[in-house]
Image (spheres, rainbow, N blue to C red):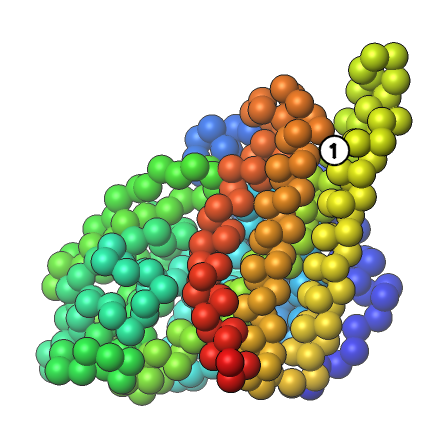
Amino acid sequence: MQTAVSAEEITHLQNSAQRFVRQEVAPHLADWEAAEVFPRGLYTRAAELGWLGLGYPEHLGGTPASAVLRNALTETLARESGSGGLMASLFSHNIGLPPVLRWGSDALQAELIPEVLRGEKIAALAITEPGGGSDVAALRTTARLDGDHYVIDGEKVFITSGMRADWLTVAVRTDAANKGRGGISMLVVPGDASGLSRSPLHKMGWHCSDTAHLRFDAVRVPARFLVGQEGAGFKMIMGNFNGERLSMSVMALGFAERCYTEALDWARTRKTFGSALVEHQVIRHKLVDMKMRIESTRAWVAALTTRLDDGDEGADWVAQVCLLKNHATQTMQFCADQGVQILGAMGFMRGTACERIYREVKVMTIGGGAEEIMKELASRQLGL
């Protein structure tokens, strides 16, 4: 159970995040989007502010923090930046490191985690393969033990921070005879490993996030880079997904809020037929519909975050997270669509948050588990 966080702590963190985005991100975001990358120095800056280490133990260079506090940061950064690409890559360690933190040896944790939390190295997670995404049990990348090294062969695709990650937490099949869940393990692979090659992928959205197709051609990594036990990888991956899905829900909430505020500001200043847009009932109703969905998402996020801090993570909680991810991303989708509609032609132009978020909706409804998978998993957890 996490220690309660005060309203003052949350407000201070939110204010710091707001200043950071407005002063150090917003003036450069368009250039980063065009370049399809943001400076590595931004990791160091986020580390200096204490954000990369939020929620990690002190002995590894982190700052223990409740889920309430971590989610407050995520929501604020998403709302202020309006950039899923920035969020995905700047915090890719939050899906790459948790398996190491929870199951890795003390030595492995000490070797990887501190330098990532200092912003000196970048960590990423590599699970998805060209032949399958949500069907993790079908992965084909292999790792065979050869003396005191594992030899990895295979491919991974759609890997966030994959082009410049210094550490990759990779799902592999260590038991070639076991074609199901039991043969899967997790290995950490250094980014400079011989035989690892990377190709950039160009996307509909998340432009300033580097995304890669990885190829492993007889890549040798020390056996000590195994995370936990052989064959335990599937459980690690499923547990990791729960945190990722909750975080994506919080991001979706922040992006929906940004669409709402941009649309509201535009509606108050834009005049048509002699009146501000907001004076037309049809526009007010669009804004109210956006607000309704935002507030329901906020309440659901708060409820599940509190349960997480209280250690209440049973089957029902997992089901609720799956349902929340669908609800939150659908809220984001609705608000982005309505925001573009309210902005009219301006909403179709690059440079508005609504336009960028509109393009980034689909990756949010697919990443971390597609809507269809979320429904099926929720139904199973609920015993339907």
Residue 209 in the image: state x and y as whole percent: 45, 44
Report the residue at 76% width, 64% height from top.
Answer: 299
Q: Is residue 72 left or right of residue 109?
A: right
How many marks are shown on the rendered structure?
A: 1
Q: Name the residue at the front extreme.
A: 384
- Write down the quadrant of residue 73 in the picture: bottom right
Residue 365 in the image: state x and y as whole percent: 50, 53
Q: Nearer the viewer, residue 135 or 216?
A: 135
The answer to whether residue 194 is above or below residue 304 is above
The answer to whether residue 359 is above or below residue 94 is above
* Residue 122 shows in this picture: yes
Report the residue at 80% width, 15% height from top.
Answer: 272
Q: Name the residue at the top extreme.
A: 274
Q: Nearer the viewer, residue 327 or 268?
A: 327
Q: Which residue is mark 1?
A: 263
Residue 173 in the image: state x and y as whole percent: 22, 75
Residue 117 in the image: state x and y as whole percent: 53, 63
Report the residue at 83% width, 12% height from top.
Answer: 273
* Residue 26 shows in this picture: no
* Quarter that holds the N terminus: bottom right
Q: Nearer the viewer, residue 129 or 148?
A: 129
Q: Secondary structure at mark 1?
A: helix
| Amino acid of disc 1 | Ala
Q: Is residue 233 left or right of residue 256?
A: left
